[in-house]
Image (cartoon, helix red, strand yellow):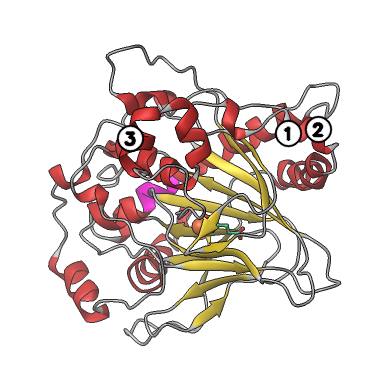
């Protein structure tokens, strides 16, 4: 299991082990998952099961709102790229994604003013449906994201420890948790239309540090690419999150932690829609990851080198090597949602789309 043979399944880790005498076992399992897989299931975690059940119950109800109500929340309204995207509004790797979604974030008041770095405008308030249309939705989703954020901080400390770093070595990139705007989305993948595309979301890496994914329904569809290029299923397991590493964490750990390409296939004809909720942990906007040098013990570096390079079929991300994290994230959003960019960031739109609005955009 600890070898560098390409993984054939996504490991399951029991978070409760990290809180007791079995912590060393947990940390060794975590080290393997972080270095060789880049994905894991996390069971027995700290987000209350009752809260998860409430979130699951609300999810289809949001999408069942009348189309006009959802369109009122459209992302194009928001300089923060938060809000609703209709079915097939995004493209990954040149193909339309068959999903409908609302991007939301933890509570954050945007303090951007003229003259500040433009990327500080990216963080701000979500757009929520009217309370009378979906009573309690905002409160439950906000509580849920806060609870996942808390877990994500603790988990980052465990990752540091598992790699032989001081527990707070990675937390320094999240400096002041009260001043972070974590993002995520609530997603609906409709069942495949016979003969049509099966791309729920095309192969991609996540951008930031850690992603915590809640698979709301039971359909398979999420797949993770191993270093040989094979697609390995990460089907739902009740009571777990799927946790994965983003390009930011890979960059700052000099590839010790592995960001792994993944995709979602549309649910098969007749199986009903699939719903999921990814939470993307934010890091401070003002850090340039390449300015930091984390001192890993030699055995972590050896494990990384034994794993070697991975060959993946995915869109790529290299800006973390040169730019401020906030700018990297803003550029990612601009490329994914040029309609929002054209309205709120005309200069950046012109820079990244010199020929005007593309017919096809490339979403991360
Ligand atoms: O819906 C899923 O299971 C995964 C979604 C995902 O990978 C993403 O939105 O980054
Ligand atoms: Fe993803």
Q: Is residue 47 left or right of residue 332?
A: right
State the SS at label 2.
Answer: helix
Image position, residue 171 (x, y; %): 32, 40
Image position, residue 20 (x, y; %): 47, 55
State the SS at label 3.
Answer: helix
Q: Contact (CB < 8 A) between labels 1 and 2?
A: yes
Front residue (pair 150, 244): 244
Q: Dividing the image into four quarters, tell me where ligand 1 lies.
A: bottom right
Q: Contact (CB < 8 A) between labels 1 and 3?
A: no
Give the residue number, with chain letter if any, for mark 3.
326
Give the residue number, with chain letter if any, for mark 1.
71
Q: Determine which quarter of the picture holds residue 229.
A: bottom left
Front residue (pair 364, 299): 364
> What residue sits 25% from the left and 76% below the top?
309
Question: In this picture, is 310 found above or below 111?
Answer: below
Label 3 near ligand 1 (CB < 8 Å):
no
Front residue (pair 24, 51): 51
Look at the image and give the residue range highlighted in magenta.
Answer: 153-158
Q: Earlier in the sequence, mark 1 or mark 3?
A: 1
């Amino acid at each position: 299991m600890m070898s560098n043979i390409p993984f054939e399944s996504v490991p399951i880790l029991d978070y409760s082990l990290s809180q007791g005498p079995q912590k060393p076992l947990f940390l060794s399992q975590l080290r393997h998952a972080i270095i060789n897989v880049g994905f894991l299931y996390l069971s027995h975690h700290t987000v209350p099961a009752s809260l998860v059940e409430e979130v699951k119950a609300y999810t289809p109800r949001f999408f069942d709102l009348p189309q006009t109500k959802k369109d009122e929340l459209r992302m194009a309204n928001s300089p923060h790229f938060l809000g609703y995207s209709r079915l097939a509004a995004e493209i990954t790797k040149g193909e339309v994604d068959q999903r409908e979604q609302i991007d939301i974030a933890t509570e954050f008041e945007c303090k951007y003013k003229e003259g500040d770095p433009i990327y500080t405008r990216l963080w701000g308030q979500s757009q929520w449906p009217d309370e009378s249309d979906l009573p309690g939705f905002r409160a439950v989703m906000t509580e849920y994201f806060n609870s996942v954020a808390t877990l994500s901080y603790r988990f980052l400390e465990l990752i540091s420890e598992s790699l032989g770093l001081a527990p707070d070595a990675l937390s320094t990139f999240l400096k002041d948790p009260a001043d972070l705007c974590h993002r995520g989305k609530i997603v609906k993948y409709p069942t495949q239309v016979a003969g049509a595309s099966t791309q729920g979301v095309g192969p991609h890496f996540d951008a930031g540090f850690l992603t915590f994914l809640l698979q709301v329904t039971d359909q398979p569809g999420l797949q993770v690419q191993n270093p040989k290029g094979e697609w390995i299923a990460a089907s739902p397991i009740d009571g777990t999150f799927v946790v994965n590493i983003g390009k930011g964490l890979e960059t700052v750990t000099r590839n010790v932690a592995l960001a792994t390409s993944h995709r979602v296939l549309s649910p098969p004809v007749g199986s009903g829609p699939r719903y999921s909720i990814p939470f993307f942990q934010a890091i401070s906007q003002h850090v340039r990851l390449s300015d930091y040098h984390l001192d890993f013990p030699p055995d972590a570096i050896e494990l990384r080198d034994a794993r070697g390079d991975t060959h993946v079929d995915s869109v790529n991300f290299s800006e973390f090597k040169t730019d401020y994290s906030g700018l990297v994230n803003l550029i990612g959003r601009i490329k994914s949602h040029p309609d929002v960019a054209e309205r709120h960031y005309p200069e950046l739109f012109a820079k990244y789309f010199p020929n005007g609005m593309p017919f096809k955009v490339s979403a991360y």
